[in-house]
Amino acid sequence: MFQSKIVVTLRKSILDPQGKAVEQGVHSLGYEKVNDVRIGKFIELNVQTDNKVEAERITKEVCEKLLANPIMEDFSFTVENHKAT
């Protein structure tokens, strides 16, 4: 079994109002050196296979078809061996 860790973010060309709100909040706390805050999504999922290449393929397809809007968002992921607990 493998665990996929996925990060989905808005493309740099897309305005991020949540990121701007957080940035203003951080500045109001006195951290003026913090800039360009972007908000995204972090998703973990387990893929039931013994083949890492297949786990990567499945993860990529799930991202492309469901988790990320290809017009507005980018995604990246890692796939690691995972032992069920």
Image (cartoon, grey):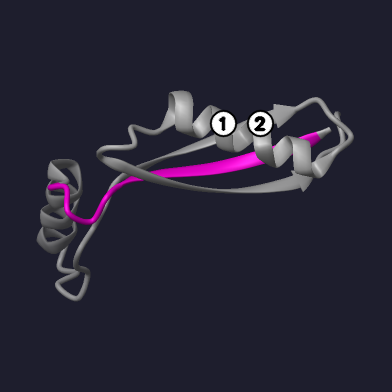
Q: Position of residue 15 (x, y in %)?
A: 12, 47
Q: Write down the region rendered in magenta.
A: 2-15
Residue sticking out furthest to the bottom: 33
> 13 or 32, which is in the foreground?
13
> Is 44 within the magenta?
no
**Left or right of 80, for residue 26:** left
In the picture of the structure, the residue carrying the numbered disc 1 is 61
- The label shown at residue 58 is 2
**Left or right of 34, for residue 50:** right
Marks 2/1: CA–CA distance: 5 Å
Quadrant in which the N terminus is drawn: top right
> 33 or 83, which is in the foreground?
83
The residue shown at (73%, 36%) is 55
| SS state under label 1 | helix
Q: Amino acid at mark 2?
A: Ile
Residue 12 vertical placement versus 67 (above, below)? below
Residue 30 vertical placement versus 51 (above, below)? below
| SS state under label 2 | helix
> Is 3 within the magenta?
yes
Quadrant in which the C terminus is drawn: top right
> Splitting the image into 4 quarters, where does residue 52 fall?
top right
- The label shown at residue 26 is none
Q: Position of residue 74 (x, y in %)?
A: 37, 46
The residue shown at (70%, 46%) is 79
Q: Main SS of the magenta segment?
A: strand
Residue 57 vertical placement versus 29 (above, below)? above
The residue shown at (20%, 63%) is 36
**Left or right of 11, for residue 28:** left
Mark 2 touching mark 1, by CB under 8 A? yes
Q: Amino acid at mark 1?
A: Glu
